[in-house]
Image (cartoon, grey):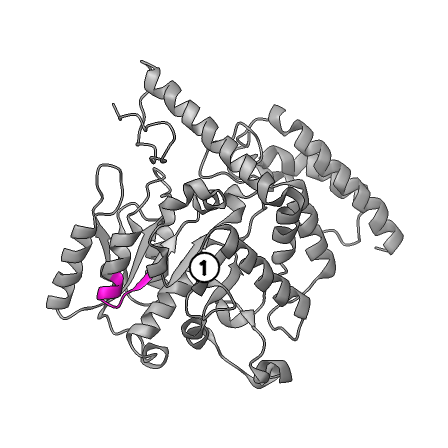
Amino acid sequence: MSPAEFQRWGYAVIDWIAAYHQRVESLPVLAQVAPGQIRARLPADPPSHGEPFPTLLADLDQLILPGLTHWQSPSFFAFFPANTSGPAILGELLAAGLGVQGMLWATSPACTELETHVLDWLADLLGLPPAFKSSGPGGGVLQDSASSAALCAVLAARERATGFATNESGAGGRLTAYASTQAHSSIEKAIKIAGLGRANLRPIEVDDRYAMRPDHLARQIEADRQAGKQPCFVCATVGTTSSNAMDPLPAIGRLAREHHLWFHVDAAMSGTAALCPEFRHFQDGLEFADSYCFNPHKWMFTNFDCDCFFVADRATLIRTLSILPEYLRNQATESGAVFDYRDWQVPLGRRFRALKLWFVIRHYGVEGLRHHIRRHVAIAQEFTQWIAASPDFELAAPRPAEPGLLPAPRRR
């Protein structure tokens, strides 16, 4: 495809996306196809010769669109919000056009330094502890999802608990981890992948607001110690998947510090709310946390995938994940003056995710982002009142209480 052809069809693709967003509300939210129906309409073999681009766009309408669930539809209420935006889409397009491989500072310095800077911006915008900034002992990095953030946190917890011995000889079945019964399934998956064993993840009971009970956590930690186990990791959640429950971070954090557990806070769903100072009470206690994550791709108008993962001590994370073969050695890395984000994640390669997040923050501005978050919370509060007043519906879970705002109605 020549530059002129790319320009021509690039305009056509942008026009297609714009038209899609204009009509998405009129499309059925769920795909109207049976299992296997899409594949049955696709050719059995790939084309021997290249096809004209208009044919590709036509098949997008005829073959692909009917098989999509429309996450951008205003009538989509499943799983979690996934509200992308124009600046995010354009940032993603530019990142794809640049084709940057950002595994090392040396492979694209702007990719690394913009990411560091944007994550520092967000640490300030969310009111996170100073340790989570790159100017302190920690820092932030973009992961693909909260699942990857959880895995990195569990791996770092494992290594810190064993003096980095498991990198050489394995976990040995002694380490235990803790999360509430309402924690995201990615925690269990991380425990399995990290080799701690699913049987060593302790589900902690919750209270009537579905938040973890610190007294149950304390008893379980003590029981495991008495049984010869070594507690090493606890995850608290700010906005659980099932009910948007808020775990009591200060009490959990104090227990984690007392027992030398890695304390990870998963705010993937509701962390964006902290852009507004009046909602930051949900993250009181983050000063005890070793790591923290939230997903801009859920509530901050940034398309999937984009998770912000912060650590209070980057040295532990880097030591856990770093391997330095000869072909990655370079002067900048050896100087110690740069971040190589390949050491902050499981994969080696990484995309230029910071570009779309940078675009979103600059397009909306801090006050623009806050305006939308406040509006969304107000809508949710109003909807909660409708449910409470209706004889035909019941509130399945209590709404988190916000100081100075409407009281959370009782469950029926």
Q: Amino acid at mark 1?
A: Ser
Above or below for 50 versus 344: above
Instruction: Find residue 323 and report its horizontal and vertical position in percent.
Output: 49, 79
Which residue is denoted by mark 1 in the rendering? 148
Q: Residue 153's image quarter?
A: bottom left
Residues rendered magenta in the picture: 256-263
Q: In the displayed structure, does residue 248 sit left or right of residue 359? A: left
The front one of 262 and 84 is 262
Whether 262 is among the magenta residues is: yes
**One can see residue 225 in this view:** yes
Residue 369 in picture, x, y percent from top left: 57, 41
Between 370 and 333, the one lying in front of the other is 370
Q: Position of residue 171 (x, y in %)?
A: 29, 73
Image location (x, y in percent) of residue 37:
57, 36
Q: Is residue 43 visible?
A: no
Q: Considering only vertical position in the picture, is 91 above or below 379?
A: below
Residue displayed at 18% across by 61% down: 221
Q: Residue furthest left?
A: 226
